[in-house]
Amino acid sequence: MQKTLIALLMGLFGTLVIAADAVPPHPYIKMETTEGTIILELDGRQAPITVDHFLKLVDSGFYNGTIFHRVIPGFMAQAGGHTPDLTLKESDDMIPNESGNGLSNLRGTVAMARTSDPHSANSQFFINVANNDRLDPGKGLATGTWGYAVFGRVIEGMSVVDKIVSVKTGPQGPLRSDVPVVPIVIKAMTRHTFE
């Protein structure tokens, strides 16, 4: 039994190492929203599992047509898990938490959203609009050793993010608060190259 468990864990570790080697070190993502365009730079070196997962969702078109469903001025803008009619949309996979990778939840960084289970990140992500280091491992809102895994940053369009968090919000449908009254839609999210 113990040998089987060790073999399974070694196989999983090997798969993660292979996946990490295949992840580009700094891919760029173009996010076209109804409020404007945002360009992200992901960090495949510091957060290879998260970046690999995110790129697969981007490449599949998963995020196209989803919305920013939770926006809080002075805190963050969260997206990637609901359609405009507030239907929950999730991918089939949850990923291990890569917080503690040396990247802090500072203004302009992109991190994975999750539940109280530290390893429950799925498709939802958020953009920090303030320095939220209290979301880092062992601090403030991130009790214990797990925080919210940062995996990239906004390199263009932070003014668009600031515009998104300044819209009128309220409770809507199944969501209790902080939902933009007029949906802010991610029209398309694709890999980006600078020419």
Image (cartoon, rainbow, N blue to C red):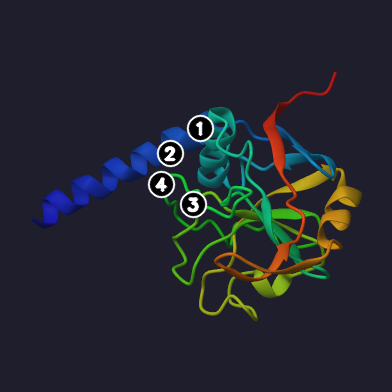
> Which three-letter amino acid code belongs to the residue tagged 3?
Asn
**Disc on the earlier residue, 2 or 3:** 2
Secondary structure beneath dot 1 equals: helix
CA distance for labels 2 and 1: 6 Å
Q: Inspect the image, locate mark 2, and give the three-letter code of the amino acid beneath it.
A: Val
**Which structural element holds mark 4?**
loop
User: Split into 4 quadrants, where in the image is the C terminus?
Assistant: top right
Residue that mark 4 sits on: 93
Q: Secondary structure at mark 3?
A: loop
SS of the residue under disc 2: helix
Q: Which residue is mark 3?
A: 122
C-alpha span from label 4 to label 1 = 20 Å
Which residue type does callout 4 highlight? Answer: Asp
Furthest residue toward right: 159
Name the disc covering residue 21, or none: 1
- The picture places residue 81, in percent across and down from the top left corner, at 56, 52
- Compared with 179, 64 (above or below) is above
The residue carrying pointer 4 sits among few (fewer than 14), some (14 to 19) or many (20 or more) residues within 10 Å by Cα, namely few
Residue 72, quarter of the rendered image: bottom right
Q: Can you say whether 56 is above or below 93 in the image?
A: above
Of callouts 4 and 1, the N-terminal one: 1
Residue 105 in view: no
Side (left or right) of 44 relative to 73 = left
In the image, what residue type sits under mark 1? Asp
